[in-house]
Image (tube, coloured by chain):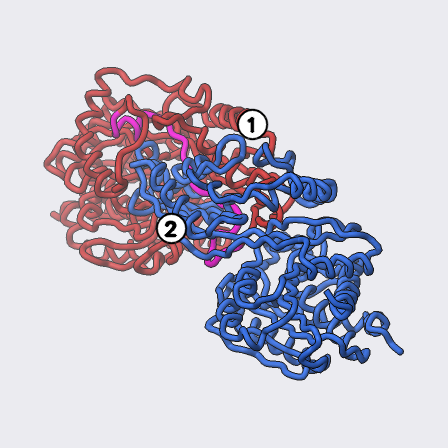
Chain colours: A blue, B red
Amino acid sequence: MTTPHDYARTHAERFKQEMIDLLAIPSVSTQPEHNADVERAAEWIAANMRRIGLTTVEIHPTAWHPVVYGEWLGAGPNAPTVLVYGHYDVQPAEMADGWHSDPFIPTEREGKIYARGAIDSKSNVMAQMKAAESYLQSGKTAVNIKLMFEGDEESNSGAIAGFVAAHKERLKADIVAVCDGSMADLHQPDLAYGLRGISCMELEVWGPKQDLHSGHYGGTVHNPVQALAEIITQLHHADGSVAVPGFYDEVRPLDTDERAELAKALPWIEQEWRDVAAAPQQWGEPAYNLHERIGARPTLEINGIRGGYAGDGFKTVLPGKALAKISCRLVADQHPQRIYERVRDYVAQITPPTVRSELRYLESGDPALIDRHAPAVQAYARAIERSWSKEPIYVREGGSIPVVVELQQNIPAPVVLMSFGYKGCAAHGPNEHVYLDLWYRGIDTMLYFYDEVNKGL
Amino acid sequence: MTTPHDYARTHAERFKQEMIDLLAIPSVSTQPEHNADVERAAEWIAANMRRIGLTTVEIHPTAWHPVVYGEWLGAGPNAPTVLVYGHYDVQPAEMADGWHSDPFIPTEREGKIYARGAIDSKSNVMAQMKAAESYLQSGKTAVNIKLMFEGDEESNSGAIAGFVAAHKERLKADIVAVCDGSMADLHQPDLAYGLRGISCMELEVWGPKQDLHSGHYGGTVHNPVQALAEIITQLHHADGSVAVPGFYDEVRPLDTDERAELAKALPWIEQEWRDVAAAPQQWGEPAYNLHERIGARPTLEINGIRGGYAGDGFKTVLPGKALAKISCRLVADQHPQRIYERVRDYVAQITPPTVRSELRYLESGDPALIDRHAPAVQAYARAIERSWSKEPIYVREGGSIPVVVELQQNIPAPVVLMSFGYKGCAAHGPNEHVYLDLWYRGIDTMLYFYDEVNKGL
């Protein structure tokens, strides 16, 4: 009899081709000109779901982009049910950002597929789809499967929150598997139990009523770019800690046990930092190590800045205004809106009288911290051990998966965070890619997880 | 017999239409895609020169854009000769910058023409052309006229320097009239005798080897935008003075007489600042008044900044690099290259070890200071008095006209700086315009100047 693992191996080449097909669809959720592409990606996934054996497949329209949902409940009402969450939308990408091949023409080089969404997160979507296919097509019937993929994760629209709240009953499960993110090392599996939240804002500074000639007015007007730089500088202390009053007030302290657990993963996280970030030196809060800074401490980051003329050539303009995009990564038990308000009040306080400023709240997501000792998490740990022949290390992720909080609030089941890919794969950056061997192992891991769930938690 | 002034009045409507025709040509010298337009503008001017009665008209190719030259030497070798300099190229302009009408479809509203180049400097070019036409076509033969217009002023390419050096003999004159810039008030003529130089640079800061996911690495990498902001902040002291060591070393001090002269213009300059700059408060070196800060003190200005993603929506990127365009406006006796070197050394010194930086030298122009008591300047003062029925106030300009230094070095004749337009006309900004009544008065002023020159200096 064929095992699900045999089935996956036999169909490995086709699986890869299907992932490539999905990667070729530029489902950029933040850019309205790609709305039709997001729609097309949803339809592609729904069609694939039908082919792999899910019995009910639906594309649910939302106020933003559709949620694709498919289920197979053939194991019966008394069998355990796994609900899988993922997202099929991607970040914007342009050749000009430094891509070596078109971000939407997936290209295979040295065992990797290069494409926008390769690591974040279409490979995760496709690992789940192909694990479900392998499970069902090899005749396994022990676990009910529900797959739910959203198209708004990168735009943080909140569509999935409404969907989950409206379909609580339908989505009922014994375990919620959130499949996104990635691992710190190529050869050492990890298991994440923490995710940072986020609070996104935009800071605008203006002074003169419009752009001015820098000769006619230079030296008499507080340059808005300079004023913005002065404000940005005051958002951190010299040691790298955030200077906004009250910023750390609600941060849940780390206990000794957890610091010891986090320290185990430090060598891998430091290696990955050297390989991927590769900045001249580490930076950040001196009282915390690299792992803690990434996963257990909040940040304030400048995501972008613009003002005046910074293109080719030179324009002797004194800019009328300047703008910075700012986001705070948050940890338990911080609240996005409250953090925004503290940054806003501080910015108002430090804005000099020579300019005006406004800090606008854009979007947010709550942080999540999962009990790493929960049985469902431990079942996943065993699945990893079986596919990797290695125990996972426990990590707190620096990224945000806002839906986790929505799922926790609406579905009374433990959440397990799953990552199959490697963090050094340029998520959100140019030349994003996925390692094919890790991807195939992800499918294997998910199949072992179904088996562990079947054995009982 | 028709006077030149009568001729100008009779043909006023046609003169305006011709200026509109020239403004409609997008002769943007810094953008290669407009090279053909710059060429077209040169041809348009040459054709117009031939029509107005100049006997020798030439388009001189240069390594960059052509110089258009035309002369009428019918007054004979013993008559005085006036050489006029101007530029027909313009700054870039896009509707997105906030224009209310297409910058290259000149639009008349309430006595003003709105178009890129309207004030800087095609109205000056056309005032000179139409003054020459009025002078010659009304039968005046007392003064020789040489008109020279370059197409690289906004790109600061240096083509005109080579042209002037190569044609010293041909350009010989008794007075060099540099016609660019604009006046501080609509109702009070001024006479500029100082121009600031400029030193343009570009500062790049980078840290990680590429853009990173702000969740995966935020809090552990010194954000290049933030580091750039920190460097920018340290370029000035809190009081608005430049913090670069040695920056003010060569600045020629103001004497009591000159400070008194500059103070006379202060009310107009302050009014214009309130009308045009309209920032919440004045800013700059506390020991100097607004006029002195603009014309007699050097500056360091951020002309543009870019880094990460600052467009619509939000991209949770930790930028790999950031860039700022910086220019220093210089006064006598500062040297552009030396100032660049001091800024470069200071930036290297204050760049933190967590990032790398580079300051690149882009382009420059020397400052110029003219003896305001020289006979040629005084002849121009009388011409202003005749056309305005008002004495001019003396001002030091904040802008740069690098060619003045080249002309001073190559042509042994006094330079007179002429400005016919109003400074509040958004040079280099959106909705640049020219007041038609000031423009017509500029033609009149130039005609009185020819008369004063004929009377003898």
Residue toward you, A4 or A372: A372
Residue B287, image quadrant: top left
- In this rendering, position of residue A328 left or right of residue B129: right
**Does residue A289 sit above or below B11 in this rendering?**
above
Q: Residue B348 carries which label?
A: 1
Q: What element carries label 2?
A: helix
Residue toward you, B167 or B65: B65
Residue under the image location 19 percent in, 45 percent down: B438
CA gap, disc 2 to disc 1? 49 Å
Chain of the residue under the numbered disc 1 shown in the image: B
* Residue B245 locus on image (x, y percent): 46, 20
Residue B13, image quadrant: bottom left
Q: Range of the magenta residues? A: B289-315
**Does residue B216 sit above or below A31 in this rendering?**
above
- In this rendering, position of residue B418 left or right of residue A225: left
Q: Nearer the viewer, mark 2 or mark 1?
A: 1
Looking at numbered disc 1 in the image, what kind of residue is underneath it? Ala
Badge 2 crowding class, 10 Å Cα cut-off, few under 14, some 14 to 19, many 20 or more, is many
Badge 1 crowding class, 10 Å Cα cut-off, few under 14, some 14 to 19, many 20 or more, is some
Q: Which mark is residue B168?
A: none
Q: Can residue A68 be seen in this view?
A: yes
Chain of the residue under the numbered disc 2 shown in the image: B
Residue toward you, A99 or B418: A99
Residue toward you, B6 or A307: A307
Q: In which quarter of the image is the C terminus of chain A?
A: bottom right
Which residue in the protein does label 2 denote? B46
